[in-house]
Amino acid sequence: MLAAVRQLKQEYEMEHFSWALHEQSDQTDAEQMEQDLEEHKLTAALNSELQENLNLVRCAVHTLQLAILDVVNKSNEDVKMLTEVARKCKTIKFKSAFELQGARYPPVWGATRWGGIYEMVSSFLEQRTFFDKLAEQFPEMDLSLSWTFAEHYEEAFKPLFICTKKMEAAHVSLSDFYLEWMITIQKVKKLQSNPFSEPLVQTLTSRLANLRGSRAFKMALYFDPRLNFAGSTLFNSEEKEEIQVHKYEGIFYN
């Protein structure tokens, strides 16, 4: 989405500049001045809207990351255990075991990589047989008390991982983001036996509600026929009136 916003802005400016050069020779100075003024207003309005959307997308992606950490973060004891073992894997003591079995080192997640915990957990689960055998030889690598956590975590957080990866694509609108978020909530909600399901649904729902309060977010949803169709209850009458007023102001007062 971030790439898409920048691309849209560049394409608009290039197209408008080319059109202006083509028409300039047929206009009087007065007409040119009037057109330049109108173009300036339109460009300023477009830049403002694009910047607002860009900031909102950044906020939305960050909010999704915060929702993940609301439920499980680095202070979790199982996360600490898995992280400690992941670090030990890269020491010389275990190098031959990994090389002999062709095993992969589980990634050690960092604070700047929101999906690091998920990737680390998934790596352990994919190679569970190897790590169980490794623990027989090296007791300090025993993860028997953390496997249940890992299974629940991977199952519950996979929809969020996929959702965020989709949001990193070039062409994702705010309404697409909203739809993906809602789909993610429904997927997590179905995991009724998973202990992370309920807290994840709660934090995802509450944080999405806060995002939806943004003017730019509301307008994006309002003008998407997939969401605001005849009979849709997405917006009440007051919200619709508010959005229409903002749109009117954006057209005539920028």
Image (cartoon, grey):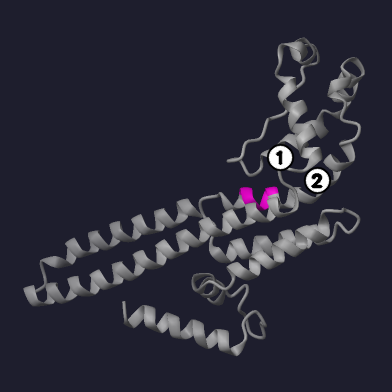
Q: What is the magenta range?
A: 161-165
Which residue corresponds to the image point at 72% horizontal and 59% vertical from the top-left? 184
Earlier in the chain: of badge 1 and badge 2, it is 1
The reply to whether the C-beta atoms of the residues labelled 1 and 2 are less than 8 Å apart is: yes
Does 167 appear above or below 229? above
Residue 104 seen in the figure = no
Does 122 appear above or below 165? above
Q: Is residue 71 left or right of residue 219?
A: right
Does 146 appear above or below 42? above
Specify the label residue 117 is tagged with: 1
Name the residue that disc number 2 marks: 153
Residue 1 picture location, percent across and down: 51, 55
Of residues 56 and 79, the one drawn nearer to the viewer in this rendering = 79
Image quadrant assignment for residue 211: bottom right
Magenta segment, principal secondary structure? Answer: helix
Residue 55 picture location, percent across and down: 47, 59
Residue 219 picture location, percent across and down: 51, 75
Type of amino acid under label 2: Tyr
Which residue corresponds to the image point at 76% horizontal and 11% vertical from the top-left? 93
Residue 188 picture location, percent across and down: 79, 58
Label 2 crowd bin: few (<14), some (14–19), many (20+), radius 10 Å: many
Q: Is residue 70 magenta?
A: no
Type of amino acid under label 1: Ile
Residue 87 seen in the figure = yes
Kind of element beneath mark 2: helix
Specify the label residue 224 is tagged with: none
Image quadrant assignment for residue 115: top right
